[in-house]
Image: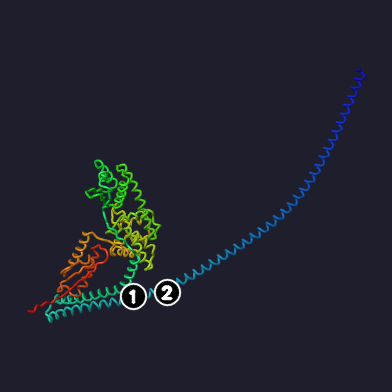
Amino acid sequence: MTALSIGVALVSALIGLVIGYLAISLKMKTAKEAAELTLLNAEQEASNIRGKAEQEADQLMIVAERDRQTLKKELLLEAKEDARKYREEIAAEFKSERQELKQTEARLTERASSLDRKDDNLTNKEKALEQKEQSLTDKSKHIEEREEEVAKLEEQKALELERVASLTQEEARDLILTDTRDKMTHEIATRIKEAEREVKERADKTAKDLLAQAMQRISGEYVAEQTITSVHLPDDTMKGRIIGREGRNIRTFESLTGIDVIIDDTPEVVVLSGFDPIRREIARMTMEALLQDGRIHPARIEELVEKHRVEMDNRIREYGEAAAYEIGAPNLHPDLIKTMGRLHFRTSYGQNVLRHSIEVAKLAGVLAAELGENVNMARRAGFLHDIGKAIDREVDGSHVEIGTELARKYKEHPIVVNAIASHHGDVEATSTIAVIVAAADALSAARPGSRRESMEAYVKRLQDLEEIANSFDGIKQAYAIQAGREVRIIVHPNIVNDDKITILAHDIREKIENNLDYPGNIKVTVIRETRATEVAK
């Protein structure tokens, strides 16, 4: 390659570079002008938008100012209206108070006038009383003078009567008193007969109807009272297993249950003896379970006793719930229901106390319905009246006192509490329902077949009846008959007359009621007989 070629190439390259530079510069200038034009257009458009925004803002300010003025006017109008209403209310209240003040002033004025009139009347009455007092003083003096004259005349009369009748004043007084006493005895006897006849005519029919209706609607049961339970054995060899080696089984059984186990020569029988029916029932259940299981040893006995004690608690609660449901009192406190369930295992004169309580509740409900009283309250009171018997062996006091405290503890109604406390007459009945419960209790206990007495109590009651009858003057003989339902008294006819036998029967009845406890009624019959006997020869 020659130098010329190289120079041409360099010149060509240089020219290309210049042309390229010029082309690039021109392109950059064009782009700059386009950018400046675009920026100018953008600024113009932003200026237009800003102007429009300022116009819209000015319009919004004008509208807002107009709305504010309108709202201000409305609020002012509402405030003026509220102020007007408030002024009217205040004016009305002032007017009402002024009216009341005027009425009060008128009443006070009238009362002042009335007091003035009363003051005048009292002044006039005081004057009249002073005049009457003076008059009475004068009359008293005159009466005293007259009494002195009468006393003198009576002394003269008494002396004259003694002289004429040949009797002293004491003898005459005794004669008059004797005659008066005989007349009064006849009058008292007559009035007692009339009163008894009138009461019987009024009360007998209604009472008989009510009691007969109540008894017809209630049926009762009879359960023999017992203190022993017999358990039958499959064979006599079980007796030795029950006793155990050196008597350890029987000692464990008796210590855990509190019941005596009697094993004698009676074939295939073991007797459980104890006064607590619940413990005796637990012992029976345990003994039967041991005989059925065949494993008889102290550990097994302890296990079964505990198991049946829990089962007995459940049974007691079930008995109480069933009884409460039967008489319509399911809302009793759970502790009261459980306590009532214990009465299933308690008897009184052979009558199951729980069944007796249910019967009394039903009778009380029937009587309350007939008399227009609260039936539910009467049933509840009748049901709970003997609740104290459930725990009277564990707590000191009579079953009435214990039952009353239980009812108060569990917030029973005061009428129910009083019915429990008064059903044996320990306190006064304060309601008709309490009287109804006492009547229902007596009716349940006295109905035929409901109870039986022990021979000792029966004989003692007969003796007490005859002793009470013989304690009065003029009694010849007294006999308690019809199982103590009647006492017949024969009097000396020359000591007790026909009028006195009515009074005597009344007094004997009151003494029996005050001194004896007995179911049902006791009839008192006084007999006076005068016989004249002659023998023809």
Query: What residue occupies the far left of the structure in this picture?
Result: 537
Nearer to the camera, 107 or 459:
459
Nearer to the camera, 295 or 405:
295
Residue visible at 76% across and 50% down in the picture: 56
Nearer to the camera, 1 or 526:
1
Q: Dot 1: what SS? A: helix
Say whether residue 183 is left or right of residue 383.
Answer: left
Q: In this view, does 25 lie above or below 437?
A: above
Mark 2 nearby-residue class (10 Å; few <14, some 14–19, many ≥20): few
Q: Which amino acid does label 2 sit on?
A: Arg
Q: In this view, does 78 lie above or below 188?
A: above
Identify the disc placed on residue 129.
1
Identify the disc placed on residue 112.
none
Q: In this view, does 60 lie above or below 444?
A: above
- Of callouts 1 and 2, which one flags the residue occurring earlier in the amino acid sequence? 2
Mark 1 nearby-residue class (10 Å; few <14, some 14–19, many ≥20): few
Q: Is residue 245 above or below residue 171?
A: above
Would you name the residue on which mark 2 appears?
A: 117
